[in-house]
C-alpha cells in the first residue's frame, strides 16, 4: 500500500499506533509555530488569519483534488479523521479527553483546553495579532507550519506569484530541510520558548514519549503532490537529504536545550533528555540478578548511569560516514566525549555538548548538499555495519533505526533504483523490524538486531 510516496505495510499499524503513538493520540507535541533557537528561522507569531481563511472552494477547501496548480483539497486531508494525516487538526480536540485531564490534574495545570503548557503545541500559538477567523479550537492549523499568513495570503495566489516572493512576505520555506526540521522540532522535541517543552514530570503524569523523524512524519502529513508544477516551483524532495538533515537538526536542538535552564529540574537533571527505556524495562526480584541494561560502545559511561538519549546521534553518525566522511570522525569523537562528560559534572557535559552541537550544525550544512548515486544504498549498509549496529542497544535508538531503513528504501523507489514491486517483496522483512519495536515493554535487543539485519540484507540484494 502506498501512502504519500512511502510503501506502507505494518508501518502504519506498528509505527504510528505504537512508536509514534504520540501523534495518533494527539497528546504529544504536534508541529508548532516557529523555531526559536539559534535564529533557525525568522518567523514571527503575528498576523495569524486562521484555517477558515484558506477554506474557500477556489483555494484549499474542495472535496475533490481537481485543482490545476495545487490539489485544492488540502483542508479535507488535514481534517481526515481516520489517518495520521489528520493528527494536527485533532490536536486541540484531544485536550478534552480523559487522559489529558488526568495529566493536567496531576500537575495542577487546570483545564487542559486553557492550560498554556498544553496550548503551546496543541494549537497554533498566537502571541501576536490574530484575524477574526483565527480559532484556537482549530488545533495545529495551516499557519503553524506555513507561517502567519497576513503578509502573504492575498498575494500567494495571484498571477505571477512565486515561491521566493511568498517567502519574502513571511511564508515559511518548508522546502528547505533545515527550516522544516526547525519548525517541526519546536513541538516534536521542544523549543526555548514558553510552553513548548514536554518535561519528565509531564511524561510521568501520562504524556506519551516524544518520537520524530523528519522525512517519515512529513510523508504522513503530506497534503500536496510532487507533480511537474511543484518540482518547477520548489524542486524535487530528496528523502535521503531530508532524513539526514532532520537527524542533524534534532541532535543540535536537544543539545542546545540541554545547555539551557531546561536541562535541570531543581537539584536533578531534566530526565527528559535521557533514554528512559534503558532503565525502565521490566524489573522484578529473583534469586539471581538479571541485568536489564546493555553496554553501548558509543556511550562510555559507568554501569547503571542514565544515558543521554542518543537515538539521533546514532543515525547521524551513519549518515556522516557516507555523505560527510570528513566530519564523521569529529562527530564520533565529540559524541563519545559528551557521553563521558556526563559522568563528571554538568559543566563539563554542557561544554562537551556545545562542541557536539556545533559539529551537528556543520553536518547539517554538509548533508544539505549530499545525496544522489548510491547514497541511499550506502547509508543502509552503514546503519547495519559494525560501527553502528552494536549501538542499537535500547528502544529509542532502535525505533530510529527501523524508520531510517524504511525511509531509505522509499528513497530508492523514488529514485527508481529499485522497483515498487521489488520493495513490496521485502515489506515482510521491514514489518518484522517494526514489530520488534512495537512497544517498549516488549523490546528485545537481539530480536531487533536480527530483524533489522534481515531487512538490510534483503535491500542489499537488490543493489
Image (tube, rainbow, N blue to C red):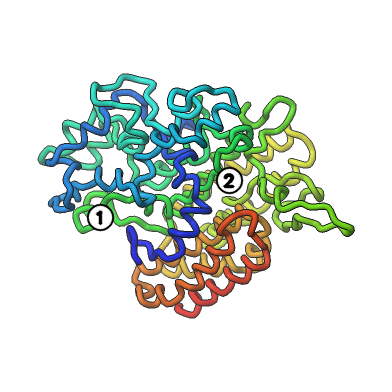
In the rendered image, the residue lying farthest to the right is: 287
Q: Position of residue 85 (x, y in %)?
A: 35, 49
In the rendered structure, the answer to whether residue 114 lies left or right of residue 108 reads: left
- Residue 323 seen in the figure: yes
Quarter occupied by the C terminus: bottom left
Q: Position of residue 90 (x, y in %)?
A: 37, 39
Closest to the observer: 34 or 120? 120
Closer to the camera in the image, 318 or 428:
428
Is any part of residue 354 visible from this angle? no
Q: Residue at x 44, y 44 (%)?
A: 181
Query: Could you say whether the residue bearing mark 2 is in a helix, strand or loop?
Result: helix
In 3D space, how far apart are the residues under numbered discs 2 and 1 (Cα atoms)? 35 Å
Q: Quadrant of the N terminus?
A: bottom left
- Taking the image as shown, residue 199 lies to the left or right of residue 62, namely right
- Residue ID for mark 2: 359
Q: Which mark is residue 225?
A: 1
* In this view, 395 is above or below 254: below
Side (left or right) of 424 relative to 298:
left
Amino acid at each position: 500500500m502506498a501512502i504519500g510516496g512511502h510503501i506502507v505495510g505494518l508501518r502504519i499499524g506498528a509505527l504510528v499506533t505504537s512508536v509514534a503513538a504520540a501523534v495518533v493520540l494527539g497528546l504529544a507535541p504536534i508541529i508548532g509555530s516557529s523555531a526559536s533557537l539559534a535564529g533557525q528561522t525568522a518567523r514571527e507569531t503575528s498576523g495569524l488569519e486562521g484555517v477558515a481563511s484558506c477554506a474557500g472552494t477556489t483555494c484549499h477547501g474542495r472535496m475533490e483534488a481537481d485543482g490545476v496548480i495545487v490539489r485544492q483539497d488540502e483542508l479535507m486531508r488535514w481534517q481526515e479523521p481516520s489517518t495520521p494525516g489528520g493528527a494536527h487538526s485533532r490536536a486541540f480536540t484531544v485536550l478534552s479527553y480523559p487522559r489529558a485531564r488526568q495529566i493536567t490534574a496531576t500537575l495542577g495545570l487546570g483545564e487542559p483546553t486553557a492550560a498554556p503548557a498544553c496550548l503551546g503545541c496543541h494549537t497554533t500559538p498566537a502571541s501576536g495579532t490574530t484575524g477574526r477567523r483565527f480559532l484556537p479550537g482549530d488545533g495545529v492549523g495551516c499557519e503553524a507550519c506555513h507561517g502567519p499568513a497576513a503578509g502573504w495570503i492575498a498575494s500567494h495566489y495571484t498571477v505571477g506569484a512565486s515561491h521566493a516572493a511568498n517567502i519574502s512576505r513571511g511564508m515559511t520555506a518548508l522546502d528547505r530541510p533545515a527550516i522544516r526540521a526547525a519548525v517541526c522540532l519546536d513541538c516534536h522535541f521542544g523549543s526555548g520558548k514558553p510552553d513548548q517543552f514536554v518535561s519528565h514530570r509531564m511524561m510521568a503524569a501520562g504524556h506519551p514519549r516524544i518520537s520524530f523523524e523528519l522525512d517519515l512524519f512529513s510523508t504522513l502529513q503530506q497534503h500536496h503532490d510532487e507533480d511537474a508544477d511543484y518540482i518547477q516551483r520548489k524542486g524535487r524532495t530528496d528523502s535521503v537529504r531530508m532524513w539526514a538533515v532532520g537527524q542533524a537538526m534534532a541532535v543540535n536542538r536537544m543539545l542546545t536545550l540541554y545547555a539551557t535552564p531546561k536541562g535541570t529540574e531543581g537539584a536533578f537533571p531534566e530526565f527528559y533528555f535521557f533514554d528512559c527505556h534503558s532503565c525502565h524495562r521490566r524489573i522484578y526480584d529473583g534469586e539471581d540478578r538479571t541485568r536489564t541494561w546493555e553496554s553501548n560502545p558509543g556511550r562510555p559511561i559507568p554501569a547503571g548511569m542514565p544515558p543521554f538519549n542518543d537515538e539521533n546521534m546514532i543515525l547521524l553518525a551513519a549518515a556522516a560516514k557516507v555523505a560527510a566522511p570528513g566530519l564523521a570522525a569529529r562527530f564520533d569523537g565529540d559524541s563519545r566525549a559528551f557521553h563521558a562528560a556526563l559522568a563528571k559534572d554538568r559543566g563539563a557535559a554542557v561544554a562537551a555538548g556545545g562542541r557536539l552541537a556545533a559539529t551537528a550544525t556543520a553536518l547539517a550544512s554538509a548533508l544539505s548538499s549530499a545525496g544522489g548515486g548510491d547514497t541511499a544504498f550506502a547509508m543502509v549498509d552503514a546503519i547495519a555495519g559494525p560501527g553502528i549496529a552494536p549501538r542499537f542497544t535500547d528502544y529509542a535508538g532502535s525505533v530510529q533505526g527501523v524508520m531510517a531503513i524504511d525511509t531509505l528504501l522509499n528513497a530508492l523507489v523514488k529514485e527508481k533504483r529499485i522497483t515498487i514491486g521489488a520493495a513490496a517483496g521485502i515489506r515482510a522483512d521491514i514489518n518484522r523490524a517494526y514489530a520488534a519495536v512495537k512497544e517498549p515493554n516488549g523490546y528485545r535487543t537481539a530480536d531487533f538486531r536480527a530483524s533489522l539485519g534481515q531487512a538490510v540484507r534483503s535491500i542489499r540484494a537488490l543493489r
